[in-house]
Image (cartoon, grey):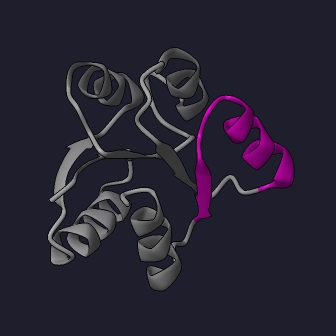
């Protein structure tokens, strides 16, 4: 099954997403700050990356500016104003899921990029 990286500094949000994905038989790796996430993303092959924008050390925007692999990145963030969504998409994210996540929307968006 596909391996997914979740880059999220809020441990409750991280656990929620990880539990949801593992219940669907996905393999999940995690990072609690943007730099750790970037290091993992650059040195491992993931099928998908889920990324928060407001992160310590390296922000989600800086992650997107630096990350240059073809792996699809979905931003999962409470920063869901139109200008923030547009900025993330301009920097290369393929989709944007607002927090708090809605279970079916979350799963459907993840599955869309793992086909």
Q: In this view, does 42 lie above or below 46?
A: above
Image quadrant in which the N terminus is located: bottom left
Magenta span covers which residues? Answer: 81-98
Residue 27, located in which quarter of the rendered image?
bottom left
Q: Residue at point 30% right, 45% down?
A: 47
Identify the residue at the far right of this view. Answer: 83
Residue 13, located in which quarter of the rendered image?
bottom left
Q: Which of 109 and 86 is in front in this view?
A: 109
Identify the residue at the far bottom of this view. Answer: 104
Q: Residue at point 80% right, 55% down?
A: 81
Q: Position of residue 69 (x, y in %)?
A: 42, 23
Q: Position of residue 57 (x, y in %)?
A: 43, 22
Image quadrant in which the C terminus is located: bottom left
Decide whether residue 93 is among the magenta residues. Answer: yes
- How many labels sit on residues? 0
The answer to whether 90 appears left or right of 30 in the picture is right
Q: Nearer the viewer, residue 22 or 33?
A: 22
The answer to whether 86 appears left or right of 50 in the picture is right
The answer to whether 86 appears left or right of 73 in the picture is right
Q: Position of residue 64 (x, y in %)?
A: 55, 27
Q: Residue at point 24% right, 27% down?
A: 40
The answer to whether 26 appears left or right of 9 in the picture is left
Decide whether residue 45 is among the magenta residues. Answer: no
Q: In this view, does 33 lie above or below 27?
A: above
Q: Position of residue 15 (x, y in %)?
A: 25, 64
């Amino acid at each position: 099954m596909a391996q997914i990286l979740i880059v999220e500094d809020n441990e409750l949000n991280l656990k929620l997403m990880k539990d949801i994905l593992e219940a669907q038989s996905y393999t999940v790796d995690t990072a609690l700050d943007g730099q750790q996430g970037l290091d993992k993303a650059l040195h491992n092959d993931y099928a998908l990356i889920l990324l928060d924008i407001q992160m310590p050390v390296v922000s989600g925007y800086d992650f997107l500016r630096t990350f240059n692999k073809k792996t699809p990145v979905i931003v999962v963030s409470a920063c869901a104003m139109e200008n923030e969504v547009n900025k993330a998409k301009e920097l290369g994210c393929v989709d944007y899921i607002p927090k708090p996540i809605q279970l079916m929307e979350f799963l459907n968006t993840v599955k869309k990029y793992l086909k």
